Image (cartoon, grey):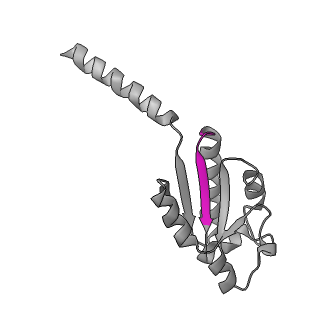
Amino acid sequence: MKKLIFLLLGFLMVTICIAQTQPVKIVFDVTSGESGVHQSAMRHISTMSTQYPDSEFEMVIYSSALDMVLKEKSSVSKDLEALVKKDNVTFKVCQMSLDRYKLTSSSLIPGVESVPDGILEIVMKQQQGWAYIKESK
C-alpha cells in the first residue's frame, strides 16, 4: 500500500511539473485608480512574463485606472516602458475611457495600444481561452 501511495504521489508531482511548463494566456483587468494596485499589477505581469516566456500576457486598463498608462501621471511608467518591449506582453487601454476623459493616444506611454472597449476585449480573450485575473486592492 505504501508503494502504491508513493507511486501515485510521484506521478502527481511529475504531472504538476509538466503542467507548470505548459504555455498559458492570461488577461489582467485593471480598473483601480490606486497606485498600489498599479504597482502590484506590474509586479505580477513582470514576474510571470519572465518566469513563463512561452506564455502570453495582456493587461487591459480602463475606467479609473487610466493614470497607469498616461505619460504625465503614471507611477509605473519605467516598468511599463520596459515591459511593452517584451514579445509576450501587451498593454491595452479602453478607447471609450480615453474618450470619456477627453484624452488621446498621444497621452499614452509609448507602446500602449487602444482597443474600442476594454470590457469587450476581456470577454473576447476569455472566449479564446485566456485566463482572467482581476487586479484590485
Asked if the magenta segment contains residue 42, the reply would be: no
Question: Which residue is more in the foreground, 26 or 44?
Answer: 26
Residue 93: give x, y in percent of width and height.
66, 69
Residue 3: give x, y in percent of width and height.
24, 13
| Residue drawn 54% across the image and 40% down it | 23
Q: Residue furthest left?
A: 1
Q: Is residue 5 left or right of residue 105?
A: left
| Residue drawn 72% across the image and 52% down it | 83
Could you tell me if residue 135 is visible in this image? no
Q: Quadrant of residue 112?
A: bottom right
| Residue drawn 55% across the image and 59% down it | 28
Question: Which residue is more in the foreground, 34 or 48?
Answer: 48
Q: Quadrant of residue 29?
A: bottom right
Residue 20: give x, y in percent of width and height.
48, 35
Quadrant location, the N terminus: top left
Residue 76: give x, y in percent of width and height.
72, 61
Point out the stretch of residues depicted in magenta: 52-60
Could you tell me if residue 20 is visible in this image? yes
Number of callouts: 0
Q: Is residue 83 above or below residue 23?
A: below
Asked if the magenta segment contains residue 53, the reply would be: yes
Q: Is residue 10 left or right of residue 99?
A: left
Q: Residue furthest top?
A: 3
Q: Is residue 130 above or below residue 21?
A: below
Q: Is residue 16 left or right of residue 122?
A: left
